[in-house]
Image (cartoon, helix red, strand yellow):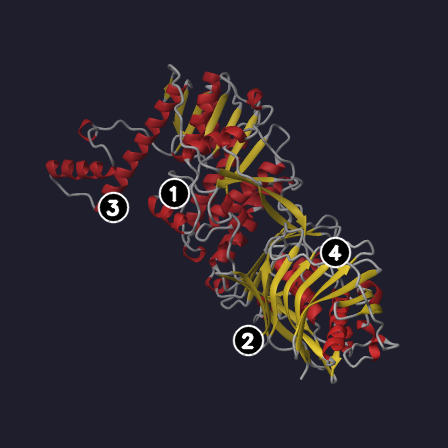
Amino acid sequence: MTATAGATSTVGASPTGRLVRYVVREVPAPASGLSPSGLDCRVLFVTDDGAGVAAALVERLTARGIDAMTASRIPAEVGGLIFLGGLRDVRGSEDAVALNREAFSIARSPAVRHSELFVTVQDTGADFGLGGRQGERAWLGGLAGLARTLSKEWPDVAVKAIDCERARRTPDRIANALADELCYGGTLLDVGLHADGRRTTLAVEAEPVPLPVSQWRASPYHDQIVGPDSVIVATGGARGITATAVLAVARAHRPRLVLLGRTPLAEEPLWLRSAGDEKAVKHALVAYHSRRGGPMPTPSQVGAVAQRVSAAREVRGTIAALIDAGSSVWYMPVDIRDSAAVEQALSRVRRKWGPITGLIHGAGVLADMPVEAKTTEMFDQVFGAKVHGLRSLLSATSADPLTFVYLFSSVAAQFGNAGQSDYAMANEVLFQVAAADHTRCPITAVGWGPWQGGMVTSELAEHFRDGGVDLVPPDEGGRAVLATLGTALPGRRILVAADGERPLHDSGRQRKAVWRVGLAEQTFLRDHSIDGTAVVPLALTIDRLIAAAGELDPGWREIALADLRVFQPLTVPPDRIRRLTLSLAHQPGGVELRISDEDSRPCQAAWVASARSGIRHVDWSPLTCPEVLPHTDLYDSPALFHGPMFRSLKTVDGISAEGADATATGVREREWPGRYPHTDPAAMDAGLQLAVLWAEHILGAVTLPMRVRFVHVHSSGALPHPLRCLVRGRTTGPDHVVCDIALLSPSGQAYVELLGVSLIRRP
C-alpha cells in the first residue's frame, strides 16, 4: 500500500513529562572476597565450551572442595549450573544467535529451576559489548539478559553473568579466572574479567537533574542524516510506540517512509465500519453471524477477529497521520524474521524510491511468563522479532547508503524483568550489535522504559504504577526519539525512562553470600586471639560489609555503613573453616547487611548508608593537654591482646579525657596476606585499638567495641604510611564510653571515619 504526502499539519502542544536519561558505563569492581551462596550446592555442572575450559574449571573447583563435573546434557537433579557456551568459537552471527536459544532451553529445565546457582559465561570483550570489540560475538550477548531476568524470577538462586575475555589465554588461565570469580566474586550480577586481570562491572548513572526533552541536545549531524529525500524503513512503525516515534520524525523532516508490519490491511466490510471500538466490533461480529445462521464463532475466535480489526484500524490511522505530517508512506505486510521476504520487499522500494537511507527497528512481541513456562515457539516469536528482524534488515540493506540506524531496545535488557527472559535477551543483543556494527553509519540503541500504550496494557500499566514506575508519555517519547536519533556514545549505553518515584535500577534483589573464615588460609587471625581463641576483628568485618555494600551500586565512589551492631563475637576454631552467611535485604528503612553463623544466629548487622548522610562534623585538631601513656611498650597494656600481625599502632603521641593521638600502619606494613581493595582493616584495627587504650584510660577497665553509629570510608584500599590515628571522646558512663575515630594523612585528609563507637566493659 502506498500513499502520497499531502498538506503538513501543525503540531499541537502536548503534555510535558519528565524523562530521565541514564548512561551505562564500565567501572572497576574489585572482588568482595565472598562466595555466592549456591556454590556449596549438591553437584555443580559445567557445560562444554569446546576448547577445554570446562574440564580445567572442574579440576580447579574440585581442588577447592567444590563438587563439580562436566555435563553434555542436563541431568534430572542439578545443584548448580555454569553455562560456558558463550565461550565457544562462532563462525558467524547464525552460530552466535543459536547459543541464545540453547541457553534459554537449558534455563527452562525444571532441574535448573530448582538449583542453587546459575551462571552464564560469555566472551563479548569483558565489558558486555560496550567497547564494540566483539564483532559477530555481539549476537550471543543475550546470555547476560537471560541471567539478569533469572535473578528477578529466581530470588532463591544465586545468579551471575560473567563476560570473560579469552584473548590469547590458555584454557587453564581462563579456568583460573573463572574459579576465582566463583569463589571470591560475591553476589555481583554483571562481572567482566579482562585478559589483563582487571575485574569490572556495569554502573548506571542518571543525569543529575532531569530536563524537559525540549532542552536535550540533539546530535550535531541530525539534519545531515535525515531529510525530505530520505527513504526510511521502519519495523513496528505502523502501531504502538514506534508509530509515535516515526510520526515525530515525519513531522520534523517529512522523509519517505516504508512501514514493515505484521498486520494485513484487508478492506472492512460495510456492516463493520460503524462499530467504533473493539467491544462494538465483537457485538457486530456476533450479530452478523447470527443473521447468516449456521455455526456461531467461539468467544476466542470473535476476540481474535476483533483484535485484527483494531490493529488494521490503528495502522490506517498511523498512515493517515504520517501523510498529514508531510511524508509519503508505503505500508508492506511482511514477516521481518524472513530475510528473503524482507529482501524482496526492499527491492521493490528501491525500484520506486531509490536506495534505503535509514532504519528504525521497533518491532517487538511480548509473551510474559516465567522462563520454565515458556515454550521454544514463544522464544522464537519474541526473540525473533527483535534479533532475526535486525539480521534481516542489516542483510537486506548491506549495499545501501545508510545514514543512521535506530534500534528500540529496552531497560529489561540491562536490568532484567520477571517474565521477560526472551525479551531481555533480544534487547541485549540489540545493544551489543549497535556497539559492534558502527563502521557504516551511526547505530543508536536506546533502552526504553515502559511507555503509555503500545504493548503496555491497562493491567500492566496499573502494575507499573503500583510499583512506583511511571510510564513514558507518548508525545514526550516521540520527541526524545527525535533528539537521540543519530547519537552514539562510544563505550556507553543510553537508557531513557519516565522520572518515577522508584529509581530505574532499584531491583530490590535479596542477596546472600558466604564468608569463609579459617586459620589455615587466614593465618594472621592467630594474632587476634582472646584467651586462646581466635576472634575475627571488627575491622575485618567492616571490610567485608563495605565490600558487600559496594556490590549494590558499583558506581559509588564513597561507601558508608550506619548503625553497625555486634551481637556475638566471630570466633574461629583451629581445625575447621567457618561458613558465615552475609545477607543483604531491602527493608522498609533501607538496605540491611547481616552476618549470621551456621545456625542462622545473627552475629553482626549494619545498614547501608549514603556517604553524604549522617555525617557529624568532628574537630580533628590536636589534643590540648595530652598526657603520655605509662606503658613503655604499647602492647604491654592489658587492654591490648594483639600479636605481631595486628600491632598496627606505632606510637601514642598523647592521651587525655578529650581523646588520644597516635601514629599507625596498615596492611602493607603489617604484611597481611591477600588483597584488600576495599578498606585497610589493619589500619582500622589500629584505630579501634587506640579507642580501647583511651577507654582504659577513662574507665580503668578493658573494653570491647560493640557498636559503631557511622562508618565512612573516604579512601579505598591499603592506606599510605604514615597514618595519623585520632580518637575523640563523646560520652562516658560507668561501664562504657562513646568516641569517634579517624585515620588521617599527615596533612589532615580523612581516609576513614568511625563515628559513635561504643565500647563496653569486657566481662
Q: Earlier in the sequence, mark 3 or mark 4?
A: 3
Q: Residue at x 82, y 63 (%)?
A: 668
Query: What type is the residue that disc 2 sits on?
Result: Ser
Using the numbered discs, state the Cα–Cα distance from disc 3 to disc 4 in whole angstroms: 69 Å
Instruction: Look at mark 1 in the image and give the residue it sits on.
Output: 456
Query: What type is the residue that disc 3 sits on?
Result: Ser
Q: Earlier in the sequence, mark 4 or mark 1?
A: 1
Please name which of the two marks, 4 or 1, marks the residue nearer to the observer.
Answer: 4
Query: What type is the residue that disc 1 sits on?
Result: Val
Examine the rendered structure and indicate whether residue 672 appears above or below residue 263. below
Q: Is residue 407 left or right of residue 751?
A: left
Q: Position of residue 580 (x, y in %)?
A: 62, 72
Instruction: Look at mark 2 in the image and give the residue it sits on.
Output: 600
Closest to the observer, 82 or 20: 20
Can you name the residue that lies furthest to the front here?
Answer: 625
Using the numbered discs, state the Cα–Cα distance from disc 1 to disc 2 in whole angstroms: 42 Å
Element assignment for label 4: strand
Element assignment for label 3: helix
Examine the rendered structure and indicate whether residue 473 appears above or below residue 319. below
Closest to the observer, 329 or 516: 516
Instruction: Look at mark 4 in the image and give the residue it sits on.
Output: 750
